Image: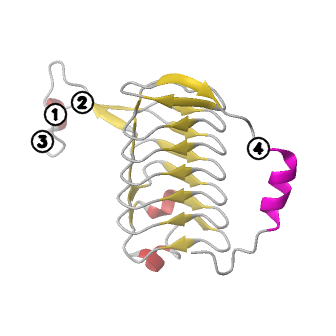
Amino acid sequence: MGENLRDKVKFCGKGVKLYPLCKMIHPATAELDDHCQIMDYAFIDAGQMLKLGKYSTVTWNCVIEGGAKTIIGDRVFIGPGAKILNSTYELDGYYAIEHILEECRKTRYGDIIIHDDAYIGANSTVLPGVTIGEGAVVGANSLVDRKLKPWGIYFGTPVKLIGMREKPTEERRKLLETMDWTNHL
């Protein structure tokens, strides 16, 4: 799919990189801001709405599962194999399979917001209704089932706060703004 998505999304900013083997369904609800990238083997269901911020990266084998809204801020890194899930099945008294009668199944949806400068480690899973604060780091193989504080470092299943990270200086932010993205990756 890759470049074939460019004219199908709601908005595609300048310098957006869509690798040839990335896939997206419901692209008409997707907004891809300047210089973001979606790498090969990423599968995205844009659902009700997907916003991918400036300079953000969705890496290989990631899944963003739609049905609700997914808002991903600027400079967010979503590591290989990460899963961003907007829905789960209600299991008590229902069947857990999508293609049977609607009366026999029930799905719970929840918007996901990942604020600027967050980092989602490889093979991590983010559950419906979660907000990840600015600059928060989620370690590899973690399960995010709750709101994460800004600039916190989280790890585990489910995640636990294990430390805090220092916010980048204004000097570094200004330096980043001077970067030439024309030959990047």
**What residue did someone put label 1 on?**
96
The local secondary structure at tag 3 comes to: loop
**What residue did someone put label 3 on?**
100
Q: Quadrant of the N terminus?
A: bottom left
Q: Residue at x 30, y 33 (%)?
A: 88
**Would you say 31 lies left or right of 83 here?**
right
**Would you say 100 lies left or right of 33 here?**
left
**What residue did someone put label 4 on?**
168
Please state the extent of the stretch shown in magenta in the rendering: 168-178
Q: How many C-alpha atoms fall within 10 Å of the one at disc 1: few (<14), some, or many (≥20)?
A: some
Count of numbered tags: 4
Dot 4 or dot 3, earlier in sequence: 3
Dot 4 or dot 1, earlier in sequence: 1
Q: Is residue 173 magenta?
A: yes
Q: How many C-alpha atoms fall within 10 Å of the one at disc 4: few (<14), some, or many (≥20)?
A: few
Nearer the observer, disc 4 or disc 2? 4
